[in-house]
Image (cartoon, coloured by chain):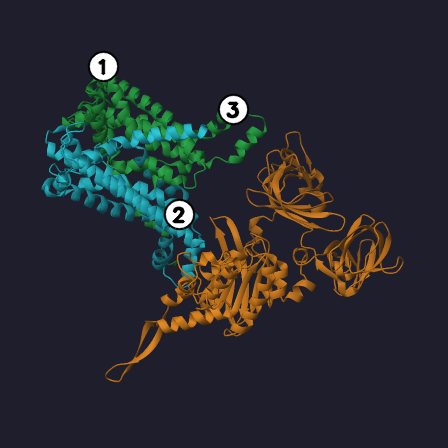
Amino acid sequence: MSKSENIIELIDVKKVYDGDTVAVEKFNLQVKKGEFVTFLGPSGCGKTTTLRMIAGFELPTSGQILLNGEDISNLPPNKRPVNTVFQKYALFPHLNVYENIAFGLRLKKVEATFRNDAGDTYTKKIKLTKGEIDKKVKKALEIVDLEGFEKRSVSTLSGGQQQRIAIARAIVNEPEILLLDEPLGALDLKMRKEMQIELKNMHKRLGITFIYVTHDQEEALTMSDKIVVINDGDIQQIGTPTEIYNEPVNTFVADFIGESNIFNGTVVGKLKVKFCGATFDCLDDYEINQLVDVVVRPEDIKICPVGEGQLKGKVISSVFKGVHYEITVGIGKFEITIQSTQNAPVGGNIGMRIEPDGIHLMQKVYTVNKYDGVITRTNAVQFGDGEFECDVTQLYKGSHLDEEGYLITAQGEKIDLSGVAVNVEVDTHDILMTDEKEKGGAQGNIISMIYKGDHYRYIVRTEENEEDYVLSCPDLWNTGDLVGIIIPKDKIKLSLKPVEGDNVK
Amino acid sequence: MKKVWHICWLALILLFIYVPVLVLAVYSFTDASMVGGNISGFSFENYLNLFKNEDLRSMIFGTLLLAVVCAVIATALATLGAIGSFYSKKLPKTLLHNANQIPVVNADIVTGFSICILLIVILRVNKDTYIPLGLGHVVLCAPFVYLSILPKLKQMDNSLYEAALDLGATPAQALFKVVIPQLIPGILSGFMLAVTLSLDDYFITTYTKPSAFDTISTYVVNATKGSQTEIKTALWALSTLIFLIVVVIVVLMNVLSGRKKEARK
Amino acid sequence: MKKLRFNRSQLCIPYAVFLILFVIAPLVVILYYAFTNGEGQFTFKNFASFFSSTNTLGTLLESFALAIVTTIVCLLIAYPTAYILARSNFKKKYVLLLLFILPMWINFTLRITALKEVLSVIEGNISKYQFLNSVIGMTYDFLPFMILPLYTSLLKLDKSLLEAASDLGASKFTVFLRVTLPLSVPGIISGMTMVLLPSMTNYVVLDMLHNSTFIMGSLIGSYFNAYDWNNGSLISIVLLVIIFIVTLVTNRFSDEDSNSRGAVL
């Protein structure tokens, strides 16, 4: 890719706060001139931190930020040709509308060419003249449709008007990139919809690059050329709104963008997948017998008479949502959500059909949990901020423990295992959560949950070292709950770490 | 009925507060030599004395100059201190807060005495340089300025500073064009407070002042012990004058703030 | 090769240095002086003589007595006043409040002069009722400092709490005793400290009223006049300890915005 095409490029950008809190990890992104790029993700996912690094308010811990091919990673914000529209506008309360917009212009110096008495030309940095500033401010106010507001105090403006002034104040400096940090978050729904369209139009007219941060997926889908879905400081997927919606790469994206039914499925043949007790044709090619996540959008499920279609079930509830009905159907122990313009009576049986292009398969991200562990003196194992009882005899085939707790191998060798480093694997189904935190081998907060038709997939994160436990559980818990983690002794799979010497090249 | 009692109580307290000041005010316009003494006529003599007497004039001028100079220094120091501490990490912030709190809770007499010991007794700074006096007054005032600025910093939108940088301002420009203007109300009230504290001070002044210099407080205390009737009655005039100035300032500030509120509507 | 960036927290360095040099260092110095003699040798003698002399102990007790009586009198006068002011339906309550605290801006020595004149007219010979006059003088000086925090804390009181209390069957008196009074404790405490500490040290009021003084502050004054820095420092340290204890106790009750003199403006 040629350098001139990418206006901004982030290479392996990483941000760590206070030595150990990772806000952004290995961020790689290229943005083309004139693109409307949206960073989308839940709050605290690192999208605002990334934006602030581009603006210059934060310095990346490592990595590079290139603007037109030049490294600007350590440039202070006032030296960057980038302007920001702040979340709460950050208009200067002591200045009126005109002075707010003129603030950047008054500080700006441009190169001008002069001719001295001898006839030689020379360049000098000069400030903009009053007339020039005046003209630019007028034009910016025109762009945001607030002509005649120059003398108003910013505190007398409505939220929407303040928003426009904030935009005018940024674009008047003719930045190469406009950064918008959840700029519509403080507006009411109607105002927000209007501003979305207006921002989009403004982007077309100005022709500059917009980088937009939001947690509102609908906003992102409406406005962007390119969406960057971020979670936990990691980029999940980059793509156009259509790609992101239709071809989510993992269950996080599928769950976050739009509504979806997510199931565990198994590939049973060439382009055939089995889930919810039925076999479907699909378009994604995976190896036979591979476990996959299956995502089906509620609007891709068509209601048909019982007997037709691949599925049948009983209607549990139906809620009218204005344009469509949201119908929940029970299929055996699974639950499936359908959006349909046609209603179905609660309690009645219906058939359902899913076309191959409505079925999205994705590689399972989490099937087993893997940790680095250490065997303790009591032959338990420490990993993931916790300590669990385990069966250490699996480390050596045919071995057993003697009365003092030493391991006797099949060859009769006596081994003291305490302090030995091991790899630990635990299947997602084998982890249980408990309210009695003390009972668990480790404790953590539920940080994410996704419904998968007949069970939920939870991620529990410990406080100390932020270790994650991924687990499946049929019961409903709440995100944020503090839970104890229980793993049955026989479900912990241990293997010896290769001795360091083996790896030496 | 209850209301009447309320008004009576308030009136009684106001009487206690104002009778002495007002009695003095009335007598200041007469030629009486003591309160309760014979009044033979109306006179401006006391007020004229206030301006004619070289001693009195330079004392009043000196007090005002000291107050303004010290308040300016205290305001500058404390404003920067407050801004700096607001953006500091927790430990230095707490330390500064607590150090700032010492002169606030400490008795003025201890503050004055300790500064006197350090500067005059140990470091042998000459009293006549006014340095101990000036430093003492800044120590007295600055913590209160700091305290009146801090809430304004807390109220300020944190992204204003970043917005200024984003628009091309250097950190110094952002500070002077954006942050400090937001703090103006706090800085002003801190400055006013500093002036009044310095004007009212007796203890720090006594322990640090040059022997030939007097502020209103130290001068009045000496004068009440002396027997110069002319000076005593001139001080009545001074008291009345200050009272009137305070009334005018308070009324003006109320009218102004009233107008501001109107304008906002 | 991180570039050195301007850091806003560095702005507090001058103020921090200032506080260390002129607030903390002087206190360290008087601590040193309090435990040394004139030749600079370490000694407990100052300490011992303070607690063995009937003169100094008597002064300590007397200043406690005066301070406590003054504080109680101020509270008894200020509470009803602040209560009526905060509760009044008067549109511009603030103006009314200003009437009560306005004399604070007149130099206190001038106000005491006025009080003395009026008292001598009323009592004839003011030296007859020394203790009473001392209490009156201190009350006259410090009353505004008591009214202000009480007014602030009573004004903040949520009216719906009072309505809730009477809705639950409390009589007016019970409402006051069980709701209003407990909720105004922070105001009471901060008002009390602001009167208690100065009335232990402000000996000028007494000096002006009857040319003689008998409280802790006056001890520092007399040691200062006798160039006895060591004993003066010891008294200062005793006062500091008292202040420290009072602050510790009151910190548990105080809330931020009724902070001391700063609340005036």
Of the residues tagged 1 and 2, which is closer to the observer?
Answer: 2
Chain under callout 2: B
Question: Horizontally, is B32 left or right of B76 in the view?
Answer: left
Front-most of C126 and C124?
C124
- Crowding at dot 3, Cα within 10 Å, few <14 / some 14-19 / many 20+, comes out as some
Where in the figure is residue A193, as x and y percent of width and height? 61, 62
Question: Horizontally, is C241 left or right of A2 in the view?
Answer: left
Q: Which chain is orange?
A: A
- Marks 1 and 2 share the same chain: no
Q: Which chain is cyan?
A: B
Quadrant where the N terminus of chain B sits is top left
| Amino acid bearing label 3 | Thr
Where in the figure is residue B213, as x and y percent of width and height? 13, 39
- Marks 3 and 1 share the same chain: yes
Q: Which residue is mark 3?
A: C174
Q: Which residue is mark 1?
A: C54
Where in the figure is residue A92, as x and y percent of width and height? 42, 58
Q: Chain C appears what colour?
A: green
Q: Residue furthest right?
A: A307
Of the residues tagged 3 and 2, which is closer to the observer?
Answer: 3
Residue C42 appears in view: no
Q: CA distance from mark 3 to mark 1?
A: 47 Å
